[in-house]
Amino acid sequence: MQYGLLNRFQATLLGAAIGEMIGQQSLPMGSSSGQLGSSGFGGSLLPVTQFYAESLITPNRLENPSDPVFQLPLNTAEAAIALLPVFLFFHEDPRKLRQNIQDVLEVWQTAEVSPPDLLAIAHPLSQALLETLDVPTCIPQTLIASRFETLPMLQFAPKNRLQHVQTLLAQPIGLEEAVRSIVAHCDESAPSAEACIAIALYCFLSTVGDFRLSLLRAAQAGYQPSLVCSLTGALSGAHNATIAIPIEWRLQMADETLETMLRLATQLFAQWSGVHDLACSESLLFVAAPRAMHNRPIRRA
């Protein structure tokens, strides 16, 4: 393994945070690329991502369906960013990944989120983490792993979008033309979250080995840049690890955000790998001489 899995977990969440920052910097003054500005999170999806990371880190935590986090009107691209911890945690098991995505969507009770499009981010992320990602076969493997062939006829649009991205990757065309072509294949009644997914995949897979270039192209695309850059940053981070993240971009991040993303990724990796925090149970440890049996002292109230 070229880079450790913990390193890739950290780079995924850092990449999403840095991508959001780069995307916001590319916006004209006073404009907004997301739909969370009125939700109390200042337009950032990172607190929602943190919520789902902490849910996995503390599996016995009781969740309240009436929590404001569950009431946010997320679209598909926003949901993909929020569920990055879920994608990381179940990256080795496609069946559990699909089931957990479905469980979250049942709590959200929204028709605005497309499960196939979530898997269009989750499975390339899994391939990057497992170091099996190959650009020519990434999308075909994603279609197979996501079981797109089982979708009802009315849900063929996600499959068609991915196949269109695959076609564009094989053609010598510029970024602007590729973005126009992707948007034309999506619902143009509003800024399309599904188009964000497809553009992020294109920006990542067309410059798969260069984190900086992938993010700069995502920003240059000019289509919902906070969302597209965040998704691109997560994918490229998972593939290229933290060593590929420019130090000047890290320095631009708020210290609290940087520390939070690293801490969450580390704790999420520890929970995934079965490493438990013993700090809270030191009083239960009992040390005895080797090769001898001893009774554990009884603690009396």
Image (cartoon, rainbow, N blue to C red):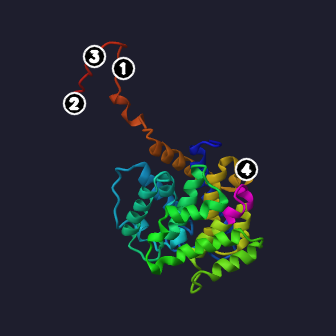
Answer with left or right where residue 79 lies relative to residue 99: right
The number of callouts visible is 4
Give whichever of 124, 11 is nearer the camera. Answer: 124
Of callouts 3 and 2, the N-terminal one: 3
Chain part drawn in magenta: 203-213
Q: Position of residue 288 (x, y in %)?
A: 35, 16
The answer to whether residue 67 of the structure is visible from this angle is yes
Give whichever of 130, 278 is nearer the camera. Answer: 130
Q: Residue at x 46, y 79 (%)?
A: 153
Q: Quadrant of residue 104?
A: bottom left
In three-dimensional space, the C-alpha distance between marks 3 and 2, rounded to whole angstroms, equals 22 Å
Q: Disc 1 marks which amino acid? A: Val
In three-dimensional space, the C-alpha distance between marks 4 and 3, rounded to whole angstroms, equals 54 Å
Q: Disc 4 marks which amino acid? A: Ile
Of callouts 2 and 4, the N-terminal one: 4
Answer with left or right where residue 265 lies relative to residue 290: right
In this rendering, the label closer to the viewer, 4 or 3: 3
Badge 2 crowding class, 10 Å Cα cut-off, few under 14, some 14 to 19, many 20 or more, is few
**239 shown above or below 164:** above
Residue occupied by mark 4: 247
Residue occupied by mark 3: 294
**293 shown above or below 229:** above
Residue occupied by mark 1: 287
Q: Position of residue 160 (x, y in %)?
A: 57, 76
